[in-house]
């Protein structure tokens, strides 16, 4: 048998080695593709939500109030199908095409309503937000007297993804409460509970510390029904004196002072969206 020449040895050294366990070279894996965009006409309510005008429900209300028009003609139904937002106005102002999705962490202070305005004249989150931000809509809501992390986005579809219980995004809270409760009672919440005909899903609750009849309780849940934490703790005979949302998915309130905002880095947001169900 002839020995390989120096030229043959050099060529052999340039051949890619297989990955261990595969038996053959593997192609490099790039990032997973983002959520697919729907092609063709879409409902105007969805397009406007995608552009960050408001939630779909609020857009339906705005259409009923005659605030949205197409080429100067007021729309009467949110089921109107459009290819894009060209010619669409809201309160007489043209709607810009949606840009890249952005997400912001906001420390909502207590004593602010999660709404654009309030007929009773109470302060809203938009009164507390710093100047110079783009048009943003809240992901879910926090009660007037609840503080902590509130996510804000310019993208209605991202808002919807984050809010859906089927996405499995965990919300975490710390509650200061007055009354008597045991860890065993809190652990029963993992099975869910029905209160006044409303079914609340599994809640992971732990007694953090107790001072007399006052205690701090940590709670994790994925549904986020209206006033869920307060109602569940009241059902256990507790009076909540302070409630803080500490995180929403991987995003936390850490590093934020009440009323302050920080944008989530685009790469972090991209990775998070790939993991949504």
Image (tube, rainbow, N blue to C red):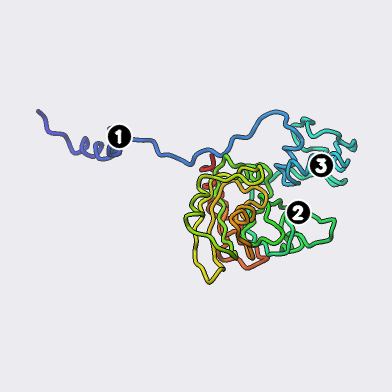
Q: Disc 2 on helix, strand or loop?
A: loop
Marks 1 and 2 sit apart, C-alpha to C-alpha, by 54 Å
Residue sitting at x 72%, y 37%: 46
According to the picture, the residue beneath numbered tag 1 turns out to be 22
* Separation (CA) of disc 1 from disc 3: 56 Å
Q: Is residue 120 left or right of residue 178?
A: right
Residue 193: image location, x then y, percent: 57, 46
Query: Residue 61 has which mark?
Result: 3
Which residue is the extreme one toward the bottom? Answer: 212
Q: Which of 169 and 9 is in front in this view?
A: 169
- The numbered mark, 1 or 2, whose residue comes first in the sequence reads 1
Q: Residues within 10 Å of mark 2 (few under 14, many from 20)?
A: some
Q: Which of marks 1 and 2 is in front?
A: 2
Task: Tell me: residue 228, above or below residue 146.
Answer: above
Q: Specify few, some or many for label 1: CA neighbours under 10 Å numbering under 14, 14-19, or 20 or more.
A: few
Whether the residues at callouts 1 and 2 have beta carbons within 8 Å, the answer is no
x and y percentages locating residue 153 in the rendered image: 67, 51
Q: Quadrant of residue 41?
A: top right
| First in sequence: mark 2 vs mark 3 | 3
* Residue of label 2: 115
């Amino acid at each position: 048998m002839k020995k390989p020449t120096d030229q043959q040895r050099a060529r052999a050294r340039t051949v890619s080695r297989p990955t261990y366990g595969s038996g053959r070279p593997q192609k490099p894996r790039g990032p997973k593709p983002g959520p697919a965009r729907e092609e063709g006409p879409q409902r105007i309510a969805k397009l406007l939500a995608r552009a960050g005008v408001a939630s779909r429900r609020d857009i339906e209300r705005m259409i009923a109030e005659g605030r949205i028009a197409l080429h100067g003609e007021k729309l009467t139904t949110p089921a109107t199908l459009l290819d894009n937002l060209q010619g669409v106005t809201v309160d007489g102002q043209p709607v810009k095409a949606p840009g890249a999705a952005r997400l912001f962490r906001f420390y909502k202070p207590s004593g602010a309503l999660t709404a654009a305005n309030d007929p009773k004249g109470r302060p809203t989150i938009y009164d507390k937000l710093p100047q110079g931000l783009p048009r943003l809509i809240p992901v879910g809501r926090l009660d007037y007297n609840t503080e902590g992390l509130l996510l804000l986005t310019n993208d209605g579809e991202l808002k919807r993804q984050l809010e859906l219980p089927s996405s499995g995004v965990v919300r975490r809270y710390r509650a200061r409460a007055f009354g008597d409760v045991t860890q065993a009672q809190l652990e029963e919440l993992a099975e869910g509970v029905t209160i006044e005909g409303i079914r609340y899903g599994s809640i992971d609750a732990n007694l953090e510390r107790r001072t007399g009849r006052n205690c701090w309780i940590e709670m994790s849940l994925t549904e986020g029904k209206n006033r869920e934490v307060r109602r569940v703790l009241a059902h256990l005979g507790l009076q909540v004196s302070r409630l803080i949302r500490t995180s929403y998915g991987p995003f936390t309130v850490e590093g934020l002072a009440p009323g302050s905002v920080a944008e989530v880095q685009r790469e972090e947001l991209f990775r998070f969206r790939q993991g949504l169900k």
